[in-house]
Structures are given as structure tokens and as C-alpha cells.
Amino acid sequence: MAAARRRRGARRYRFTEGTAALALRIPEVPPRGNGNGSGVEGPAARQWRSRARAPSAAPRVFQALDSRYGMYVWPCAVVLAQYVWVQRSGLRGKRVLEVGAGVSLPGVLAARCGAAVILSDSEELPQCLQMCRRSCLMNGLPHVPVLGLTWGRISPELLSLTPIDVILGSDVFFDPKVLTGL
């Protein structure tokens, strides 16, 4: 079961399964002060990132209070992360692709549970791909590939994928315009 609490600009979740538990703290960091939303790095982000280096079993993700897709943790991603946590024993050694990863909470958690993960988001949203890479680096997962894959577009990256065991996706159909490419 997931319990959510909100405190000091962060959402906190605790997942339990039997005697195992996973606690998540997802900070809410405003975008860079230039107001155009072009980046997410600022003093609050750097301060949180430096605190996030302490060892922990929980994945760390970075999010910005930014209305663009993929820049913050959507509620469905938390639910999917809870499901990944409950199914973690079956993920070890599996090839997992997270589509529309954005902040990448479910995919990063799957990687930390032993899956061979590939994170993807639209090649048209470089800020989302950058967010995926940041989440990987924050979790000591620099080897996790991040691919730009766009709905309805056949690309060399898509064609080069080897068979996948599990596909993760949360809130990937939020925008009705995306459905036209399927």
C-alpha cells in the first residue's frame, strides 16, 4: 500500500509489501528563474541534488514544477513504481523498456531492482531525455540507455532494440494528439 504525505516542498510515499518497505521522497523544485522553463537547474535544485547523494535503497528522481510533460512525477508513475516494487523479484535480469519515461521513477526503480532497463521519451522533447539522464546519474545508473523514441515514427533506435520482456508506461496517453501517431 502506498501512503502519501506532503512536507517541505516534497511528496513522500511509503510502499510496503510484507516486511519489505520502500520510502520515496520526491522534491518539488521550481524551474530556473528565467521564467521560460528552458531548464530546471537552480539553487534549490543543486541543494537538493547534493543532499540526495546519501546512500539509500529508494531511487532518487529530480522533478521541476513545470507544466511541460515529463518534468515532474505524475500520480500514475507513483502507482506504477509501487507495482514495480511489489513485482521486483520477477524483474531481475529482465529487459525492460519504459516509454514516455520523463522523470523515470518506474524505470529507475526497475533498474535498481536488477532489470536491464532502457528509458525512452519523445525525441521531440529533449528536456525529457535530459530528465531521464539526470535520474540515471542520481541513482548511480550511468549505463542505462536513454533513447529518443516518438510514437508512430520508425527510427534506427527503435529498429535496433533487442527483444523486450516488459514495457512500462504511465500517463503516456495524456495528450490526445499523441494518439494520432499510433
Image (cartoon, grey):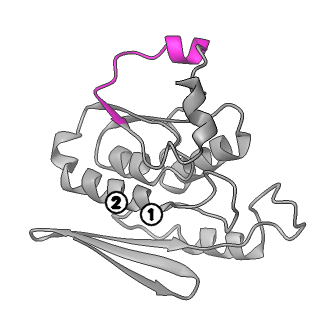
Q: Nearer the viewer, residue 55 or 73?
A: 73
Q: Is residue 171 magenta?
A: no
Up-down: is 9 above or below 174? below
Give me the C-alpha separation between circle 2 and circle 1.
Answer: 7 Å
Q: Nearer the viewer, residue 73 or 176?
A: 176
Residue positioned most to the left: 18
Q: Nearer the viewer, residue 47 or 70?
A: 70
The residue where tag 1 is placed is: 75
Up-down: is 56 above or below 94? below
| Element at label 1 | helix
Q: Position of residue 80 (x, y in %)?
A: 34, 53
Residue 174 appears anywhere in the view: yes
Q: Position of residue 11 (x, y in %)?
A: 48, 77
Q: Which residues are magenta?
A: 155-167
- Residue that appears at 16% across and 46% down: 89
Q: Residues within 10 Å of mark 1 (few under 14, many from 20)?
A: few
Relative to residue 128, is residue 31 drawn left or right? Answer: right
Q: Is residue 163 magenta?
A: yes
The residue where tag 2 is placed is: 79
Q: Quadrant of residue 157?
A: top right
